[in-house]
Image (cartoon, grey):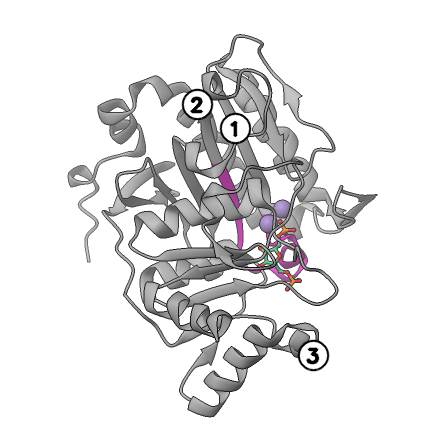
Amino acid sequence: MSKHLETLQTLTEYIIKDHPDLLAVFAQIEASTKIIASKLRSAGLEGNYGITGTTNVYGDKVQKLDDFANSLIIKKLEATGQIKMVYSEELQDPVELNKSGKYIICMDPLDGSSNIDVNLNLGTIFSIYDAKDFENRQLPNGDKQICAGYVLYGTSCMMVMTFGDGVDGFTLDTELDSYFLTHQNITMPKSGKNYSLNENAYNSYAEPVQGYIDFIKKEGNRKTRYAAAMVADIHRFLIQGGVFTYPETKQKPKSKLRLMYEISPMSMIINQAGGKSLSFDGRKLINPLNIIPQEHDQTEPIILGSKENVDEIAKFYKD
Ligand code: AHG
Ligand code: MN
Ligand code: MN
């Protein structure tokens, strides 16, 4: 099939048309993710596998490429002169880039880092906020995101994003080194048979999650899909339907995934694609976009996916 690239909108055209104020920021996100994609492709050849020997604020072993992606994106964003603060999963504390910058960025520079050394899918997750909304330095909360997006470094490299008016996806043409709009207005199926959940933690889960696992096993027509990179799992579910959950456990009621870097952006994307996202505050299910972060490294339980699948899990919390 010929590509007819001349008929497809480039990422640059898309941003010029509807979000010209963010042209510089997107130019730099685009540049960073292209460099990361290329670095990942050649990691085995260039000796870039392995860990740095340090741990991040969550106690995770930092991989060399986590560090690389984090520093690269910050450097590229700084060059725009438009970013006030960057909050990152790989930073102990946020960094102020320009006191009078217009935007705040939150990011997970490399999602799924355990996949680096085994040559599997990874991602970058980002959110953009208006700095004016957070003048006295309170932490940015999900429902104030101007834009949320991710890049999936998969068999091809894709950028998927929302500005609060639907979800669009761009595929990187490596020959021309440009992202092209290939997935316009992504609408996720209302339900799907695939699910991502670490069933090995069954004994640690509370009753609702155990009840759900018992139910789907009895039903017996689902398939587990677990990529160890939520970007990859979420992308699958956006296209094919299904549900991703990293729930609370008896030992970790606040679970693992990070509110500002993973949960808020992915929730906005899923909601905009017609899916649903729920967190659990210890008593009831809540909209994660309404959670006001108290700490930048705050984690929360999360259920994200096709509306009917999320509602199906939610039923077990009510009984
Ligand atoms: P990161 O690589 O940024 O630390 O994130 C990994 C996250 C998420 O993407 C993935 O779904 C989950 O952690 C996997 O965690 P487990 O290894 O505990 O299953
Ligand atoms: Mn992550
Ligand atoms: Mn990460």
Instruction: Tell me: residue 84, above or below residue 249.
Output: above
Kindly report the distance in space between the C-alpha atoms of the residues bearing marks 1 and 3.
Answer: 38 Å
Secondary-structure class at tag 1:
strand
Residue sticking out furthest to the top = 100
Query: Residue 217, how many percent across, how many down?
Result: 50, 87
Provide the residue designation for mark 1: 105
Left or right of residue 176, residue 48 in this image: right
Q: Amino acid at mark 2?
A: Val
Query: Residue 197, how many percent across, how many down?
Result: 55, 70
Secondary-structure class at tag 3:
helix
Q: Amino acid at mark 1?
A: Ile
Dot in front, 2 or 3: 3
Give the mark count: 3
Query: Residue 7, how many percent across, how many down?
Result: 15, 40
Please name the residue shown 35% across and 64% down the image: 306
Q: Amino acid at mark 3?
A: Asn
Provide the residue designation for mark 2: 25
Residue segment shown in magenta: 111-126
Judging depth in this view, the residue of 28 and 40 nearest the camera is 28
User: Which comes before the other along the chain, label 2 or label 1?
Assistant: 2
